[in-house]
Amino acid sequence: MPIVDVEVVTDATEPDVIGKETLQLLADELGDLFGSESGGTWVKLRTIDQNAYAENSAAVGPDARPIFVNILRAETPERGALRQEMGKIAEIVARRLDRPRENVHVLYAPRASGRIGFGGELLE
């Protein structure tokens, strides 16, 4: 059930940062990483215009185009596995979206089990 929200900071030269085919490849590769069955990993993508992005006490140049990846899973992996998984996620997203890995930032939400419902049914 992993739900992956990807937010990509873009500039005017990138009107179509990612097409449906690339998004599908990203979803497939992340699904493989998570060990999901078909249709078990959901990936949503949003773009953020660079003019709507800032960093404190810093002028953001045109090369600062970060990607924020938010992961929601039923259970969060233990620390060692989490560290490895985060690295693989950053690598996959960077490669698929053609950005430097250091520009990909991964955040895990607390485990979803017991607090998320699909079709109104609580996931235990």
Image (tube, helix red, strand yellow):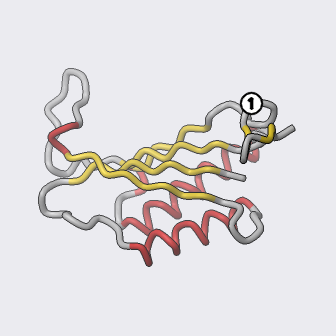
Residue at 67% in and 65% down: 31
Quarter holding residue 96: bottom left
Residue at 14% in and 43% down: 61
Task: Pick out the residue farthest to the bottom.
Answer: 21
Kind of residue at badge 1: Arg
Most foreground residue, 15 or 86:
15
Residue 36's spot in the image, x, y percent? 75, 64
Most foreground residue, 102 or 72:
72
Q: Is residue 76 left or right of residue 72?
A: right
Q: Is residue 14 left or right of residue 123?
A: left
Residue under label 1: 115
Residue 109's spot in the image, x, y percent? 62, 34
Task: Pick out the residue farthest to the top.
Answer: 57
Quarter holding residue 20: bottom left
89 up-or-down from 70: above or below: below
94 up-or-down from 115: above or below: below
Residue 85's spot in the image, x, y percent? 66, 52
- Give the quadrant of the C terminus: top right
Residue at 52% in and 68% down: 26
Task: Pick out the residue farthest to the right.
Answer: 124
Residue 50's spot in the image, x, y percent? 19, 45
